[in-house]
Image (cartoon, rainbow, N blue to C red):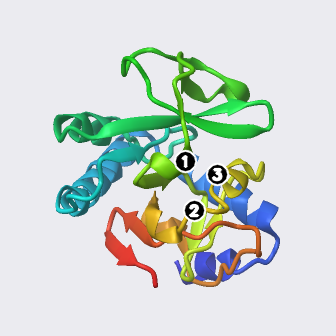
């Protein structure tokens, strides 16, 4: 593990991105499921205690990301309103799906809701953003398109969190000025609040 941690300190974002995505994909479906269930538990324990959260933006997982299906189900049971990202041109918009099963492949083959019921980002209480990595300062490493960085650039980091596997929390990653920051990170080993 020490050798991998050293490798994670690379300053080249594309190399780090590639390394972490490959490691995530190599986990296999059983490990993804097991870690996702642990993460779901940590996430829901924290979220269910916060009565100020009524609307939450989730994401549809790709490339062995943390599975969000159980989170989706439980948040609906808690009467939260859910939104998902939809790529329109060169930007992300957030939409409320009419039905949890009414999704189809959009740009980059990512599942998106089949609706155009858009909402202003300022009306969403919490954004759960997909991340390739998160640094100890809260800077997020995404997939390189800058979609979330642009969409959430004016959103307070207190309203942005990420759910990732423990190995995706990279202490040596400081990101760049344009990279958005998260204030909370949930991993399969626990919860981290970033000031």
First-in-chain label (1 vs 3)? 3
Q: How many marks?
A: 3
Q: Where 38 sits versus 147, above or below?
A: below
Q: Nearer the viewer, residue 109 or 88?
A: 88
User: What residue is pinned by disc 3?
Assistant: 22
Q: Where 162 sits versus 145, above or below?
A: below
Between disc 1 and disc 3, the foreground one is: 1
Residue 81 visible, this angle: yes
Dot 2: element: loop
Apparent side of residue 58 relative to residue 25 in the rendered image (left or right): left
- Measured as percent of width and height from the top left, residue 12 is found at 82, 71
User: What residue is pinned by disc 1?
Assistant: 121
User: What residue is pinned by disc 2?
Assistant: 155
How far is the residue under mark 3 from the one under mark 2?
30 Å
Dot 3: element: helix
First-in-chain label (1 vs 2)? 1
- Residue at position x 62%, y 73% from top? 139
Residue 60 visible, this angle: no
Query: Badge 3, how many Cα within 10 Å: few under 14, some, many 20+?
Result: few
Dots 3, 2 in contact, CB < 8 A: no
């Amino acid at each position: 593990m020490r050798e991998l941690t050293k490798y994670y300190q690379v300053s080249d974002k594309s190399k780090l991105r590639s390394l972490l995505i490959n490691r995530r994909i190599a986990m296999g479906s059983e490990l993804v499921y097991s870690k996702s269930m642990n993460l779901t538990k940590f996430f829901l324990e924290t979220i269910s205690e916060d009565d100020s959260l009524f609307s939450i933006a989730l994401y549809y997982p790709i490339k062995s990301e943390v599975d969000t299906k159980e989170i989706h189900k439980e948040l609906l049971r808690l009467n939260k309103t859910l939104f998902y990202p939809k790529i329109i041109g060169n930007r992300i918009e957030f939409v409320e799906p009419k039905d949890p099963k009414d999704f189809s492949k959009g740009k980059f083959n990512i599942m998106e809701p089949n609706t155009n019921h858009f909402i202003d980002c300022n009306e969403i209480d919490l954004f759960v953003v997909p991340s390739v990595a998160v640094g100890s300062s809260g800077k997020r490493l995404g997939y390189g398109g800058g979609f979330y960085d642009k969409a959430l650039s004016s959103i307070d980091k207190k309203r942005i969190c990420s759910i990732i596997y423990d190995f995706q929390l990279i202490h040596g990653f400081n990101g760049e000025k344009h990279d958005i920051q998260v204030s909370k990170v949930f991993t399969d080993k626990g919860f981290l609040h970033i000031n």
